[in-house]
Image (spheres, helix red, strand yellow):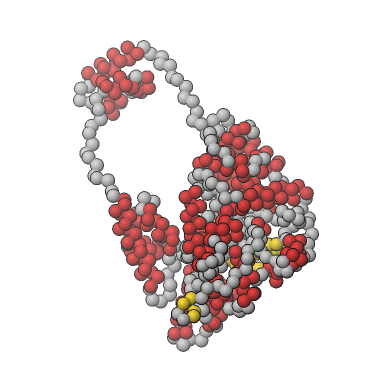
Amino acid sequence: MTYQNGCELMLNFFPTLNEDELLISAICRYKIRCGFRNRRSLERSVYGDINVTRSAILPLNVEAIVEKHPPTSKVDSNELILKHTLYPFYTAYLSMELSTQIYRIMRSGNGVAIERMLGFPSSPVKPSSYLKYCPLCYQEDLNVLGESYWRRLHQVPGVFYCLDHKVLLKTSDVLIIDGRISDYITATDACSNSEVNDSFPQTVKEQNLKYVKAVNYLLKSNMTRKSLAFVNSFYIDRLREQGFTSKNGSIYLDKLLKAFINHFSPEYLELMQSSIMKKENTWLRRFVNNNGKNRSPLRHLLLHGFLNIEPVDLFETKDVIGRLKPEKKKRVPKFNLEERRKKWLELVADNPNANRAELKKLGKGLNTWMRAYDLEWYEKVTPKKNEYKKRASKIDYKKRDEECLKLVKKGFEKLISKEGKPTRITLGAIRREVGAKRWIEDKRLVKTQKFIDTVYEEIDDYRIRKIKWAIKDMEDKGLPITPYKVQVYAGLRSSSTSTKELILRLLDEIIKV
């Protein structure tokens, strides 16, 4: 990091961000203007002396960039997150609580895998592996600005056409691995103005442009988030209006699937990573059922398109009905009430020491009838159940949470400071370190679970930490260092090109820094 008289230097300047420009794009342009050759030096200049995850779409530590600007700067972390990242898209259909949590992590957090919180690893809808661009936007940028930039709308999953020029987007060579950009390469250097041959049918183009328009609304409208229960009920109401559910909200799945497939061609659904194969286990079946799980925004917008509604229709709706409980039919007793009461009293009198369970066996259908049609009277005249022993006092989960939090923090510190080959930080590893059993996974231990989620180490982060350890340990022991020997020393089984590239990059960083 650059210091002067013991103080960290402010940024002399930072490029003014263009409309809808990704924050990472501005950093790429800053790199070129300042002539940085070393990636770590660039990141220190922009972020300060903190570890950085180079996310192209959901960057962390945005406030650190703001703090590096002079006090008079008008750069604001809120504007950077809302207008220059994909935060508005990926959190649009999340609860306000979870959206706020992700916002705070992006603003000032580090080391937390937002992609995991959003369900990226398990989601069938994956982000693009490369940055995309519009060749006509690129040419206009050169004519007007003298340079081009990466637009965030073009990076959203399922966006294949430029909303302004209605042409197919091109895929650049700038690689994105798990949301992280491989290198800080500007759009000016990576793009060209040659258009792509568009072989898609006109219907696919029209449907995708409608989708892109909806995505653009999500990116530019900071709407109040709705709960998952509200969103589910909204969909049930719209499906009911179009005849796809019963009055109570039970879905006619076969009818819905047939109409959905007729609306979107199989080719388009495959393009949108949302093919419908077997109706018994299709994503649409799970989507419209209230299973308590968040879904990909892409599939929300597909359902909007099918129902012919706009995102604004959902976010401006105040009241929903959703599923209704079926009305219970009143049961009409077939027997005379007085006669039934008389029989029940005789049964109780003939068995003075019997409890309710025993009376139920003796009375059989009579007991059931009395409870169904004369419950209040039945409760008054029927002996109570045997009293059970008093239960032990309830567990104080707040107190237990604090104790467990101290325990897992201690376990985490031991794991992270262990000598020798690093151990991956997972719930199981922490549990084994402190000798705890499954009770430590209790959801009522709120603070404990939040801490575990915070320190949980993704496999790619763990792989990087192992490689760094291997390089340092081999240096300390004076061992010869080559990418292959580092791979073996770190215990990495994979010998793929990406693994070799990662080792070479980390070797370059450690040697240069």
| Residue drawn at the location 50% of the way across and 56% of the way down | 102
Image location of residue 100, percent across then percent down = 49, 53
Tally of numbered discs: 0
Please indicate whether residue 131 sits to the left or right of residue 40 in the image.
right
The residue depicted at 53 percent of the width and 82 percent of the height is 511
- State the residue lying farthest toward the left: 353
The residue sitting at the front extreme is 72
Q: Position of residue 351 (x, y in %)?
A: 22, 22
Up the image or down, 353 lies above or below 176; here it is above
Res 239 seen here: yes
Asked whether, in this view, residue 267 is left or right of residue 434, the answer is right
Q: Is residue 335 above or below residue 425?
A: above
Give the image quarter of residue 173.
bottom right
Observer able to see residue 65: no
| Closest to the observer, 343 or 421 | 421
Q: Residue at x 30, y 19 (%)?
A: 377
Q: Position of residue 35 (x, y in %)?
A: 63, 78
Residue under the point 43% across and 75% down: 421
**Could you say which is closer to the camera, residue 88 or residue 453?**
88
Q: Position of residue 204 (x, y in %)?
A: 74, 49
Q: From the viewer's perspective, is residue 363 above or below residue 10? A: above
Q: Nearer the viewer, residue 255 or 66?
A: 66
Front residue of 115/212: it is 212
